[in-house]
Image (cartoon, helix red, strand yellow):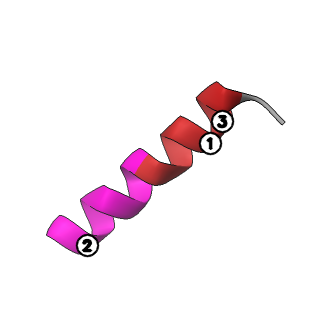
Amino acid sequence: MSILYILIHIMLYHNCIYK
């Protein structure tokens, strides 16, 4: 597991919540 991978998932999740 990479930090980048986790960051991308968090960003996607935030995008989903914001929209």
Do the residues under discs 1 and 2 have CB atoms within 8 angstroms? no
Tell me where residue 9 appears, x and y as whole percent: 54, 50
Q: Which residue is mark 2?
A: 17
Helix, strand or loop at mark 2 = helix
User: Distance from label 1 to label 3 (Cα)?
Assistant: 4 Å
Give the class, few, some or many, for how many residues have Cα within 10 Å of label 2's Cα (few <14, many ≥20). Answer: few
For the point 62% across and 42% down, the residue is 6
Sequence-wise, which precedes: disc 3 or disc 2?
A: 3
Q: How many marks?
A: 3
Q: Which residue is mark 3?
A: 5
Report if residue 17 lies within the magenta region.
Answer: yes
Helix, strand or loop at mark 3 = helix
For the point 51% across and 39% down, the residue is 8
For the point 27% across and 58% down, the residue is 15
Name the image quarter holding the C terminus: bottom left
- Residue 18 in which image quadrant: bottom left
Residue 15, can we see it? yes
Give the class, few, some or many, for how many residues have Cα within 10 Å of label 1's Cα (few <14, many ≥20). Answer: few
> Is residue 5 placed above or below 18 in the rendered structure?
above
For the point 30% across and 68% down, the residue is 16
Do the residues under discs 1 and 3 have CB atoms within 8 angstroms? yes
Q: Amino acid at mark 2?
A: Ile
Residue 19, can we see it? no
Highlighted magenta segment, given as a residue range: 11-19
Return the mark for residue 19: none
Q: Which residue is mark 1?
A: 6
User: Distance from label 3 to label 2 (Cα)?
Assistant: 19 Å
Tell me where residue 10 appears, x and y as whole percent: 46, 51
Q: Amino acid at mark 1?
A: Ile
Give the class, few, some or many, for how many residues have Cα within 10 Å of label 3's Cα (few <14, many ≥20). Answer: few
